[in-house]
Amino acid sequence: PYTGPPAADILAKYKEYLRPSMFYFYSYPLNVVGGRMQYLFDDKGRRYLDAFGGIATVSCGHCHPEVVDAIVNQTKRLQHSTVLYFNHTITDFAEAIANKLPGNLKVVFFTNSGTEANELALMMARLYTGCHDIISLRNAYHGNAAGTMGVTGQSNWKFNVIQSGVHHALNPDPYRGVFGSEGEKYAKDVQELIQFGTSGNIAGFISEAIQGAAGIIELAPGYLPVVYNTIKKAGGLCIADEVQVGFARTGSHFWGFENQGVVPDIVTMAKGIGNGIPLGAVVTTPEIAEVLTCKSYFNTFGGGPVCTAAGLAVLNVIEKEKLQENAFVVGSYLKERLTALKDKYDLIGDVRGRGLMLGVEFVTDHKLKTPAKLETLHIMGQMKDIGVLVGKGGFYGNVFRITPPLCFTKEDADFLVDAMDYTMSKM
Ligand code: PMP
């Protein structure tokens, strides 16, 4: 039983002490006091099916017992910083992560967050190439510090601070983009940005394989191979932001970039890597990593023993419970059911994504693709009342983001779609 303060008291304190550093979904915030696998529990003991997983931060499931044990055991043994001394949890996890990556991607830098990971990746690309210009995609979200806000490509998130040397390429968005699903056509824009907006040499390119916060947009097929070639020719490095799309979420592959058949020079990760523990990482080649040896580089807590113990447990659980396979099987089933719902309701303009990283875009007009923002909010709120939590995103706030913990079952998928169907049938 919950013995903490009532939600109204928490809301009052939030208004006084935390706004605008936090925001919440729903007209009245949900007071979540517990979690277990794919479920969250509120202060009244009500259970919710969590189909958002804290923006894909929960990979194995809320409070997965093996991950919790790893955290508790390591906490009792040693909590410390990452620098100064050796501890085997750090080296074990670095080895395990490197073994998951292709090519020569085997040097790991741990961070506390996705923003930090991307900041470091951008800095490494700039140091390695001696160039400043970076190309990123319109609509992208990569973090909220100086460099990452620069490469973020949406006015909803950008604050007006100096963000120099970034060029935002056409987003290869199969639904709203001018070239539909023809990835190679969008790739030409990257070539032109280099030709007409830079000296001809650049530091690099950063993108997700499926944009998360931007509204689950899977880059048009064939886009990344052409772009990576173009970037290479301009002397730049290719950075894959796997903060949301990585860690088995797409089902077909462990990493999002593998879905486009490319091998990046630098890979960044966070969120699902720690199943709720603050942890991020940058992985690159020994040659690129070498650029950081010209100074002392350190990150006090990034990848400390407790976090890396959690990370190792997460990898073990993903493997042991075949969560990648589950993401593929359940994700494919869920996508099928959502696609059938699209045939039933005009309000659904698009169903997309892969594995357990799916998006549903709501529009009031299929031809004009007019964003159905209010309707999205309404359906989301009603589904919460039925007991299903989904995320929301996209530039217009009209996309459901469905990124549950990877232990999501077919029955959960049915419950989600049935709740959505019921809600929409009442509109
Ligand atoms: N990259 C991507 C793709 C993200 O979705 C996010 C967070 N939404 C970040 C980077 C930043 O991660 P963090 O919030 O952990 O700094």
Image (cartoon, rainbow, N blue to C red):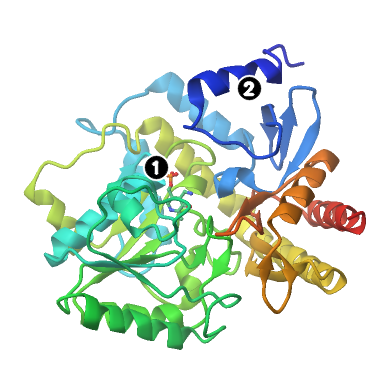
Choose between 33 and 163: the one closer to the eye.
163
Please say if the residues under marks 2 and 1 sit with CB atoms less than 8 Å apart.
no
Q: Is 301 or 148 nearer to us in this picture?
A: 148
Left or right position of 256 against 103: right
* Mark toward the start of the polypeptide (2 vs 1): 2
Residue at image location 37% in from the left, 23% down from the top: 79
Is 105 in front, or is 334? 334
Up-down: is 205 above or below 292? below
Q: Secondary structure at mark 1?
A: loop
Q: Quadrant of the N terminus?
A: top right
The answer to which image quadrant residue 83 occupies is top left
The local secondary structure at tag 2 comes to helix
Residue that numbered label 2 is attached to: 11
Residue type for callout 1: Ser
Vertically, is 412 above or below 297?
Answer: below
Q: Residue at x 49, y 42 (%)?
A: 274
| Spatial CA span between label 2 and label 1 | 26 Å
Compared with 273, 340 (above or below) is below
Residue 401, image x, y percentages: 64, 56
Residue at 51% from the left image edge and 63% from the top image edge: 211
Residue for badge 1: 113
Task: Name above or below for residue 20 compared with residue 138.
Answer: above
| Residue 185 visible somewhere in the drawing | yes
Q: Is mark 2 within 8 Å of ligand 1?
A: no
Q: Position of residue 386 (x, y in %)?
A: 85, 42
Disc 2 or disc 1, which is closer to the eye? 2
Q: Quadrant of the C terminus?
A: bottom right
